[in-house]
């Protein structure tokens, strides 16, 4: 009986510990240009504590982010995208990061051949 109680307690703790407050947002990322932009944002956001996943849609220029609202927030996500060199909602791209982007990722970069 003691073993069953221990197992129940351990499972309860595990369930509570894994039950973060998850939220989903859509971030307007109007300056993305190509698949490299998509990869840069998705890989960059994986490094941010509290972000579970992100998906960049090139057609709509929106980034869907699923995150733990106890560990991060919308402003931090926008800042992280800005730090990668892209505009996020009203948060403008960090200029130094933008300058380091490949030519294809800069505004109008896909128009040059």
Image (cartoon, rainbow, N blue to C red):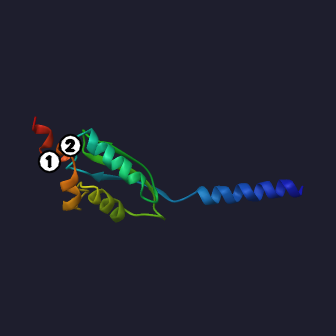
Q: Residue at x 35, y 64 (%)?
A: 76
Q: Do the residues under discs 1 and 2 have CB atoms within 8 angstroms?
A: yes
Q: Residue at x 30, y 43 (%)?
A: 38
Residue topped by disc 1? 107
Judged from the image, the secondary structure of the residue bearing numbered disc 1 is loop
Q: Quadrant of the C terminus?
A: top left
Find the residue positioned furthest to the left: 112
Residue topped by disc 2? 33
The answer to which of 45 and 57 lies nearer the viewer is 45
- Count how many numbered circles sit on residues in the image: 2
Where residue 50 appears, x then y in whole percent?
A: 46, 59
97 left or right of 18 in image: left
Q: Which mark is residue 59?
A: none
Q: Quadrant of the N terminus?
A: bottom right
Residue 81 shows in this picture:
yes
Find the residue positioned furthest to the right: 1
Where residue 49 appears, x then y in whole percent?
A: 46, 60
Residue 90 shows in this picture:
no
Q: Residue at x 11, y 44 (%)?
A: 108
Judged from the image, the secondary structure of the residue bearing numbered disc 2 is loop
Q: Residue at x 58, y 57 (%)?
A: 19
Where residue 94 appears, x then y in whole percent?
A: 22, 61
Where residue 12 appears, x then y in whole percent?
A: 70, 57
What separation in Å lies between label 1 and label 2 (alpha carbons)? 7 Å
77 left or right of 4 in image: left
Quadrant hosting residue 91? bottom left
Q: Dot 2 surroundings within 10 Å: few (below 14), some, or many (20 or more)?
A: many
- N-terminal of the pair, mark 1 or mark 2, is 2
């Amino acid at each position: 009986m003691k073993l069953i109680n221990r197992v129940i307690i351990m499972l309860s703790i595990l369930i509570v510990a894994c039950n973060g407050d998850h939220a989903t947002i859509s971030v307007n990322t109007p300056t993305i240009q190509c698949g490299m932009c998509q990869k840069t944002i998705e890989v960059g956001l994986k490094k941010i504590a509290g972000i579970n996943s992100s998906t960049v849609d090139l057609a709509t220029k929106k980034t869907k982010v699923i995150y733990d609202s106890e560990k991060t927030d919308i402003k931090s996500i926008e800042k992280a995208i800005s730090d990668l060199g892209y505009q996020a909602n009203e948060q403008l791209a960090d200029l130094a990061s933008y300058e380091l982007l490949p030519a294809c990722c800069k505004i109008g970069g896909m128009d040059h051949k």
